[in-house]
Image (cartoon, grey):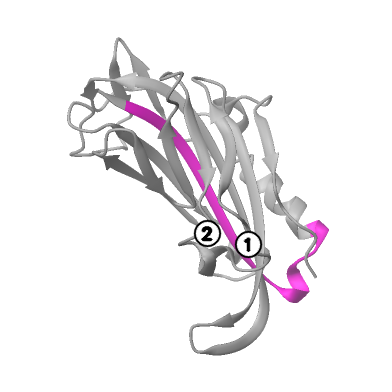
Amino acid sequence: MAHIIRMVKSVVHFDKTNYTHENRSKLNAQLLETLSPPVRIHDNTLQLAPNLQTDLNPSVHHLMVIQHNLDYTPLINESHLPNLQQTQLYGFKSPDHWNHELFAIQSNTNKPEILDIHLKYSGNELQIAYPKRTNHKVAELHAHTPIRYRLNGQSDFTMTGRKERTFTEFDFMLEYLGQATHLKLNVPMPIHTLPHAFSTSMRVVDERKMLY
């Protein structure tokens, strides 16, 4: 049996001249118009829409993440390159603790129906960059009570030396759909924009800093 998380990940890189309140508002508006990956649990069965195919199975994993990756960097930088939208599925066989993206996810020892979400700065220092963060608990993820986690960072360096300062905005939406033991593919279901799919009243954990 697997815990099932639906996640949307948006990562956008700004150069110094484009890191403005106007562009960040533009990004937020675009993000909330994005279509969410159609997925649900019914009768202990994870159901995926026809456009989502996978060899993973909840009968042999302890956590599955259906993740929609977004990159609107071309939109912000007014590039002619396409914006990225891609859905991927991840499976984890460890029984109660999983590292994924910027997070350490674990079963709550006292309440197994809850997943604890921690920011894992160690190991992700190059992605998040400055200011330094500590590993810490971000939120408890309850079934069908989504959270939105926002973080930012700035960098003046690459692996080979100094570069022009860039800023990165991380935006994650996570929803714990519950547990499933079976998988069913090619299930027709409606596709909604993110606010509808995740609920407009989702809890927001905003750990962004003022960066210059």
Q: Which residue is mark 2?
A: 83
Q: Residues within 10 Å of mark 1 (few under 14, many from 20)?
A: some
Give the image location of residue 31, x and y in percent. Answer: 62, 45
Residue extent of the magenta highlight: 3-22
- Taking the view exactly as shown, the residue that stands out farthest to the bottom is 161
**Label located before the other in sequence (2 or 1):** 1
User: Residue at 55% across / 29% down in the picture?
Assistant: 140
* Res. 155 image quadrant: bottom right
Q: Secondary structure at mark 2?
A: loop
Query: CB of mark 2 within 8 Å of CB of mark 1?
Result: yes
Task: Report the quarter where the N terminus lies.
Answer: top left
Q: Residues within 10 Å of mark 2 (few under 14, many from 20)?
A: some
Q: Main secondary structure of the magenta part?
A: strand
Give the image location of residue 55, x and y in percent. Answer: 18, 39
Q: Which dot marks residue 75? A: 1
Residue type indicated by callout 2: Asn
User: Residue at 25% across / 27% down in the picture?
Assistant: 186
Give the image location of residue 110, x and y in percent. Answer: 45, 20
